[in-house]
Amino acid sequence: MSVNKPRANAPRPKETEEKRPRFRVSLDWEHIFKSPKNTLSWGTFFIILSIILEVSFFSHIVTGLSDQSVIDSLGNESIRDAGRQTRNFFGVLGAVLSHFFVYRWFGIGALLIPVVPFMAGWKMAFGKELLPLGKVTKEVIFFALWTSLLMGYVILMSNTESNLSFMAGGIGYISNIYLFDWLKWGSIIPIIFALFVFSVSFYNVKSVIDTWQQNKAAREPEPVEQQEEIPEVEVPAEAEIEPVHESSIVAVVNDTYDDDDEETEEEAGELVEAEAAEMKVTMLAASERKEVAMPLEMAVKSDPVIPVLQAAGPPSLELELEDTTHAESAPAEDLEDEDVNATILREFGQYDPQLDLPSYQFPNIGLLNDAIDNQHEKVTQEELESNKIRIVETLGSYGINISKIKATIGPTVTLYEIIPEAGVRISKIKNLEGDIALSLAALGIRIIAPMPGRGTIGIEVPNKNRETVFIRSVLSNERFLKANYDLPVVLGKTISNDIHIADLAKMPHLLMAGATGQGKSVGLNVILASLIYKKHPAELKFVLVDPKKVELTLFNKLERHFLAKLPNSEEAIITDTKKVIFTLNSLCIEMDSRYDLLKEAAVRNLKEYNAKFAQRRLNPEKGHRFLPYIVLVIDELADLMMTAGKEVETPIARLAQLARAVGIHLVVATQRPSVKVITGLIKANFPARLSFRVTSSIDSRTILDMGGAEQLVGQGDMLLAINSEVIRLQCPFIDTREIEDVCDYIGGQRGYDEAYALPEYEGEDAAEGRGELNPDDFDGLLPDAARLIVTHQQGSTSLIQRKMKLGYNRAGRIMDQLEVLGVVGPFTGSKARDVMFHDLSGLEEHLRVMGIS
Ligand SMILES: Nc1ncnc2c1ncn2[C@@H]1O[C@H](COP(=O)(O)OP(=O)(O)OP(=O)(O)O)[C@@H](O)[C@H]1O
């Protein structure tokens, strides 16, 4: 066998030379600018810089002429002398900066320049953009140059060069001298043309004109005869499906956000929602037509997103790829959409859901009780020593000798880890649990034999004086503040006094059990409080189910911020079993519709979907929207299972099985962890389980698949089992007053108009009882909607949405009520419903008879 050896005189390979170390000073710019420690300082620096620039430039307008001589002689005299003579507000520095920016370059156009460092500084310091930075930078550069050119023209034409030429700056003045040679007074033409070109390309003037024209056309009454045959998808004019129109609608919303005008913001939001749904059908109709007419080369171009999904394999759960017919028709439309979306992204930056409530203030930690954890009551040295001695003696009396014992003091229990001498059987120690408890005269001794991954045997002994872990101490903990989880929840303090933070989004659901009075409700409140402290109302909604009627009432005040509810229900907190069934089914509908959106967006989970939406790669006019997480909290499953059984179990199991990918997570608590309540179906879908003290080891096994929870000492002492790992934790304590203060604080702020509307779900009974609907239950806008439908002879929800500027849910509800009233026929799929009245007089008579007008 021959081996190729390198010859001694062979040329040295190139890589060796490249690998030789070079002495280079390399700065880690990423760290310098982006490290959280530095951003505040850099941000403040840029803000100060912008103020210095602005004041200097203004000052230069008055002092520029007299400072000119100082600038000219700068090299010849000392800075000190120059400083004394300079009149600029910021001395020599201000004079020099102004000399360049104002005098040499931009003239008064330079006054715009400081806007850029100010906005950049603000973004760095506070992590938020006042306006989209990239867009503003381009505008500032253009208008600084353009103002300079315009001023140059004005000054040259008015012969005021000597005094005022600084207002044009070097760029404007010199450019105008050249332009003047060519065009004389006509040099204003290229200047105005430059403004025109910039406006057209930058502000998408064409789309504004198109929108205006379309709106004008839409306002003109449509002839009745033509509409008789038109199905639900209306306005099939070619111009209306131009994506340029879409961008303008989104632009309107964003402009409103930028203006911080909250009232108009909502109106615009609703308008867009209505327009979006209408456009959804219009675009659908358009895509169907395009499928036929699309040229071949367009059809084979693929959507850039779809291959990514294919490469990543079949998505989890229900997600499947689009069917091929759709995939073939999608690309051309998607390519157009991508262009529009890219333009919107460029102009308005990323979509920020928090701008829904721009002035929302997160609750501060000061609202919570500042009692510090009662350190002084901790375990004393004597207690430790006497426990150690008793453990060693008890084990010794059974012939078990210990080579080492070590204690770790936790908030509720102290963990004694022992290493027995060689040859001792673990099961022997485990069997002595009762004897050790007896000798220590303590309740709730738990033996962990062996301690996983530690090579020891653990004996947990409750402390005589236990420590209360206050919620404030955990929520203000740096680890929690920095936790970058999607749904961070603090569950408690571990035996080594670390706080245990979990990500509910990853769990993905939590099942809690515990006998009465052991701390379940406090535990639920702690979970809710952790989420409220970390998430903005736009990002998270709660569905609260409280059959006990008193536990979660306090959260009612969060209705217009954090709560979700069924459209027709009065109370945001659900206490009635029937409503619970409706709500659970409604959540299943929400889950299914979210899956449809994910499928259409070709993404695999909510995070990817929202990221894509924020990058403006999903068109709101096709029904896409930012999807908040939804956390369903049930404070007493036992009660529901007893009264409704399968009706509750099935949707819960379905949600638990499927909803994680679409951001719906469940936290379910129960007093009775019996197999009738925690059925196999439910249990199998809750990998994370938490148990407070239960009454028997059978209960403990039902919830945790192991004993031990019956040995806990109550008051928030708990065992958390995730993926076969069990941790003992002390739950933090939050009291009613604290929850009240936090809820008052949030509830007192401006919120959404109403709670987040879940999809409507009508139980079978409701469908049967439809004919008996009480006129008092009808929507106030029902008569107007009926007149609209009859006037247009078109039973379309989107018509109500668009003309009456209503959200989709409300318009849909009105349409259902119109059906009950007999104004329109039943739902017929994609076609518009039949209209049962041909003229308004017939309708008015009918409304009068029905007692509605
Ligand atoms: N983490 C904790 N720290 C200290 N004390 C606690 C803690 N959790 C609960 N407690 C005490 O236990 C009492 C009962 O707690 P909680 O109301 O949460 O019980 P529960 O399990 O919800 O009972 P029920 O099922 O009857 O509603 C509280 O009023 C409080 O005094």
Image (cartoon, grey):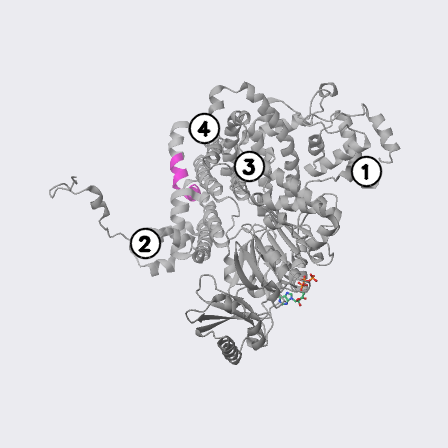
From the image, which quarter does the N terminus lie in? top left
SS for tag 4?
helix
Asked whether disc 4 touches disc 1, contact meaning CB atoms under 8 Å apart, the reply is no
Q: Cβ(mark 4) to ligand 1 < 8 Å?
A: no
Q: Is residue 313 left or right of residue 814?
A: left
Q: Nearer the viewer, residue 750 or 486?
A: 486
Residue indicated by mark 1:
769
Q: In the image, 90: left or right of 852?
A: left
* Residue 291 shown in magenta: no
Q: Report the predominant secondary structure element of the magenta stretch.
A: helix
| Residue type (three-letter) at the residue carrying disc 4 | Gly
**Residue identified by numbered label 2:** 74
* Viewer-nearest of discs 4 and 1: 1
Location of residue 701 by image quarter: bottom right
* Whether residue 565 is visible: no
Give the spatial CA distance, label 3 vs label 4.
Answer: 63 Å
557 in relation to 375, above or below: above
Mark 4 — residue? 186
Point out which mark residue 319 bears: 3
Residue drawn at x 73%, y 58% as measured from the top left: 550
Name the spot of residue 696 as percent of width and height, x first: 64, 63
